[in-house]
Image (tube, coloured by chain):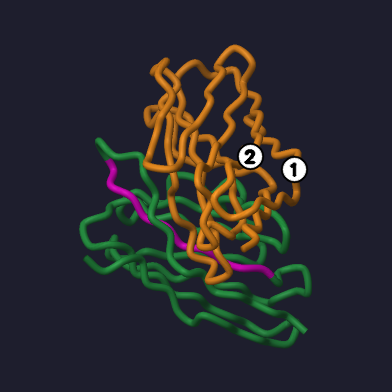
Chain colours: A green, B orange
Amino acid sequence: EAGVVQSPRYKIIEKKQPVAFWCNPISGHNTLYWYRQNLGQGPELLIRYENEEAVDDSQLPKDRFSAERLKGVDSTLKIQPAELGDSAVYLCASSLVTGNYEQYFGPGTRLTVT
Amino acid sequence: AQTVTQSQPEMSVQEAETVTLSCTYDTSENNYYLFWYKQPPSRQMILVIRQEAYKQQNATENRFSVNFQKAAKSFSLKISDSQLGDTAMYFCAFMKHRTSGSRLTFGEGTQLTVNP
């Protein structure tokens, strides 16, 4: 069984530029999460999807961040424009909706904003 | 809101010895889950062990076991017979029961180094 796939693994951009991250969850997993992990800290949830619906986006900075999961499978997280403080690792995770609370994480995308 | 605290930023242990990582949490919930995740330099977050709050018995997975003290809101991880491959950042995490949402709240992490 393939795990959670994320791309790219690394991204370096200049501030004010846009950037996008892609995630493909484990097949059959209805719930998808985007977390941000700052250096030396634990991950923090940005947004959670149940199928194509964003059910928890309370910590997503909506002025510059957006996300979509149009068909309820893969997802894209976008930042526009990027700021220096956005440098972090962006982790995607997935889980089954019912009967399973375990979240499976992808390898993450390390973003550096210069 | 829930908070998770790991008071040991770094720890080291000799290979084959036992080490315990500490975690405390704060919540008003009665039903919840607790987890320990391992994050090696590859950044892949890997689940080590989980504990359901309603279970009194401490969870065990091979060399990994927990000491869950619900009243004290403490959830420590014991690694026995430490191996070089155990070197990683370890995160304690909390999740409310699924009927209340499934956000993971992580602690700050403990960097564990296993020395040969």
Other-residue count near label 2 (Cα within 10 Å), few / some / many at <14 / 14–19 / ≥20: many
Badge 2 element: strand
Q: Residue furthest top?
A: B71
Q: Is residue A104 above or below residue A80?
A: above
Residue B75 in percent (x, y) is at 57, 29
- Check residue B8 in the rendering and tell me which mark sits there, or answer none: 1
Q: Position of residue A28 (x, y in %)?
A: 21, 57
Q: Which residues are magenta?
A: A88-97
Secondary structure mostly seen in magenta is strand
The total number of labels drawn is 2
Mark 2: amino acid: Leu
Rendered image: mark on residue B21: 2
Left or right relative to B111: residue B59: left
Q: Residue at x 29, y 39 (%)?
A: A100
Residue depicted at 35% across the width and 39% down the height: A101
Give left or right: position of B25 versus A34.
right
Q: Is residue B67 above or below residue B82?
A: above
Cβ atoms under marks 2 and 1 closer than 8 Å: yes
Say which amino acid is labelled 1. Gln
Residue B8 falls in image quadrant: top right
Q: Which residue is located at x 21 percent, y 65 percent?
A: A1
- The answer to whether residue A53 is above or below residue B63 is below
| In front of the other: A52 or B70 | B70
